[in-house]
Amino acid sequence: MNRFPRVMGMRSGYDPAEVDALIGRIESTLGRGSHTMEPVTADEVRGATFRAKRGGYQETAVDFALEAFVVALETQAKRPVRLAMAEPTGEMLREEWFETQAARVERVAFRPGRMGTGYNEDEIDAFLDRIVATLRGTTDYPVTAKEVREATFSTVMFRSGYLIADVDSFLADIAEVLDQRT
């Protein structure tokens, strides 16, 4: 099965059999395809390596697909526990809880993008600053959860950028927090 484009000529790419085996495990974990395969975690997908094979899959195409699968696996893994961060506890005052969320945004550290690609770091950092100000109530122009969900950022190539999957996952969590700010 050809899931990805192949390299041309005598070049080497990722071994198709190894890539297809991992994709099969991912699909099984996500509830698609065969359910008899061993489940895989997002960390296993991040750490996956493949042997080089002449005429194999194009590395970039596979890497981008794996980033999307990491997001899907992390989203699935968070579903049962997501409510734990969804609202303040009875012991913690509402503003204190939003302050802890603002501090969480300030402390976040994203991994670098794969193969020299990722979101523009300056754009992400500026957007996170706006989110912190919104959570602390120190801005006249607060960011809404809808804006966070619909935000788009430019990507960079061959220079440092934040891993797209990490940023998207974090912003999805923060959008849920901002839903409660209103």
Image (cartoon, helix red, strand yellow):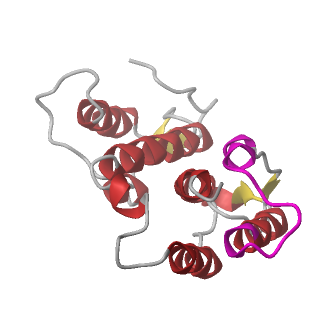
> Is 163 on the left-hand or right-hand side of 33?
right
As displayed, is residue 28 above or below residue 13?
above
Q: Name the residue: 39% across, 55% down.
A: 49
As displayed, is residue 78 above or below residue 146?
below
Q: In the rendering, at what x and y percent does residue 129 appear?
A: 77, 73
Q: Quadrant of residue 10?
A: top right
In the image, which residues are magenta? 134-150
Q: In the rendering, at what x and y percent does residue 178 appear?
A: 62, 56
Q: Name the residue: 15% across, 34% down.
A: 37
Does the magenta portion include 144?
yes
Q: In the rendering, at what x and y percent does residue 57 appear?
A: 51, 34
Extreme-right residue of the structure: 140
Name the one closer to the observer, 133 or 93. Answer: 93
Quarter in which the C terminus is drawn: bottom right
Answer yes or no: is residue 77 visible: yes
> Is 123 on the left-hand or right-hand side of 78?
right
